[in-house]
Amino acid sequence: MKSYELLSLQKLNSRYADELKEAACRVIDSGWYLRGEETDALEHEMALYLGVPYVVSVANGLDALRLILKAYIELHRLQPGDEVIVPANTFIASVLAVTDCGLVPRFVEPSVYTHNLDISLIEPNITPHTRAIMVVHLYGRACWSAELEQIARNHNLLLIEDNAQALGALCDDGRRTGSLGDAAGTSFYPGKNLGALGDAGMVTTHDKELADMVRALGNYGGYQRYKYDYKGLNSRLDELQATLLRVKLRYLDDENRYRDSLAHMYNSFVRTPLCTLPHLPQVQGTHVWHQYVIRTRHRDAFMQYMSSNGVVTGIHYPIPPHKQLAYKEYNALSLPVTEQLAGEVVSVPIAPYLTEDDIRYIADVINNYVE
Ligand SMILES: *Cc1c(COP(=O)(O)O)cnc(C)c1O
């Protein structure tokens, strides 16, 4: 019997092992480990890749989002107590960034087809306290439209992207996620489409004032050593991760295209009424398939069946933020679409090292499932 992990970081990175080792050795030998040539080069390459003028590397994806919001507060474009519209169906970090800055999340339900924030539900959720919208390109699928931009303009709201799962994705008009809103936070957590070999993150923006503030806040609150203008944090991406990310960035587009072909294979090979398959977007490149997520009613039995046939599956995510113990104050909210998805979603393996035969095999296992 074949066996598949949900994601093998070993298989993922061994494809580039020689280049990664060579790059790491260069940094080890250089004697320079934080804020140097590699970080500068990565920021420059990412700016070109995304089509944004300003890129600030930080320690992780959650910090990227926190620092964006903290910077807006420091710039008086947000203040504690303001409301931020967030998708109810997201990884908790999107919401943690909001509450960590003393801002108030306003949870909005997803579309059951895209799993992303339902843009048509934003306006009914705008209150006199709303100052920003955070969209999350969940599972790698761009959550963006001209209508969204219009809503933000009409109500004078900041538009922030949580781009942690979608680096390399395009919106319908061909711009990259991470370049669409006022600012975006990206994560290079090892399992993300562009993964470091440790923690790393980045803020990308068209706004110089914001970029400068994020850079200061991530550097203890100052631009110069021993001179501090704000109460900051220490949030840096190190030279070792930067050099490894530069190697992997060169392969990201190919890997994302390959993921897309795997997702299309799954959608054509899997045919069982017991599973609902992800909705394929109409515009190519608008989904980079960080996860391939199906839905099934008796999830525990399904996952058990899959694993006894050698296929490890996962759940992204089993408990939505508003139902977490950490957010007791929101536990009584009823967000039925989010709660239904949380009860039914299953992620099956998708990764650049899988072949068509692997997808056929996993699809056959899924097709042989009986309730
Ligand atoms: C991974 C992730 C984050 C946080 O990134 P870290 O680098 O793990 O801090 C934030 N939002 C979403 C949607 C994520 O998937």
Image (tube, grey):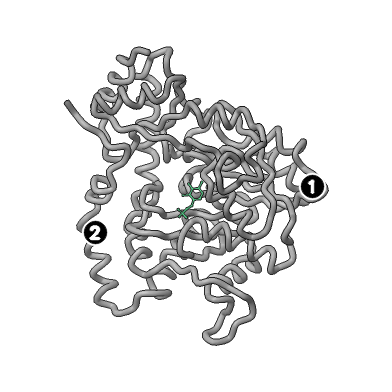
Picture coordinates of residue 53, whole percent (x, y): 56, 62
From mark 2 to mark 1, how far is it between C-alphas?
48 Å
Looking at the image, which is closer to me, 168 or 341? 341
Residue, far bottom? 226
The answer to which quarter of the image holds residue 174 is: top right
Element under disc 1? loop
- Which kind of residue does numbered mark 2 sit on? Glu
Looking at the image, which is closer to me, 224 or 109? 109
Mark whose residue sits in front, 2 or 1: 1
Residue annotated with mark 2: 19
**Where is 178 relative to 140, above or below?**
below
Count of numbered labels shown in the rendering: 2
First along the sequence among labels 2 and 1: 2
Q: Tell me the quadrant of the picture where the C terminus can be found.
A: top left
**Where is 200 relative to 29, above or below?**
above
Dot 2, how many residues are within 10 Å of its Cα: few (below 14), some (14-19), or many (20+)? some
User: Which residue shows up at 24% across the image and 28% down it?
Assistant: 310
Dot 1, how many residues are within 10 Å of its Cα: few (below 14), some (14-19), or many (20+)? some
The answer to which quarter of the image holds residue 291 is: top left
User: Is there any visible trace of residue 141 in the rendered image?
Assistant: yes
Looking at the image, which is closer to me, 346 or 223? 346
User: Which residue shows up at 29% across the image and 72% down it?
Assistant: 27
Q: Tell me the quadrant of the picture where the N terminus can be found.
A: top left
**Where is 97 relative to 333, above or below?**
below
Picture coordinates of residue 184, whole percent (x, y): 57, 54
Picture coordinates of residue 229, whole percent (x, y): 64, 80
The answer to which quarter of the image holds residue 353 is: top left
User: Is there any visible trace of residue 286 in the rendered image?
Assistant: no
Residue annotated with mark 1: 155
Residue, far right? 128
- Which kind of residue does numbered mark 1 sit on? His
User: Which residue shows up at 53% across the image and 50% down it?
Assistant: 93
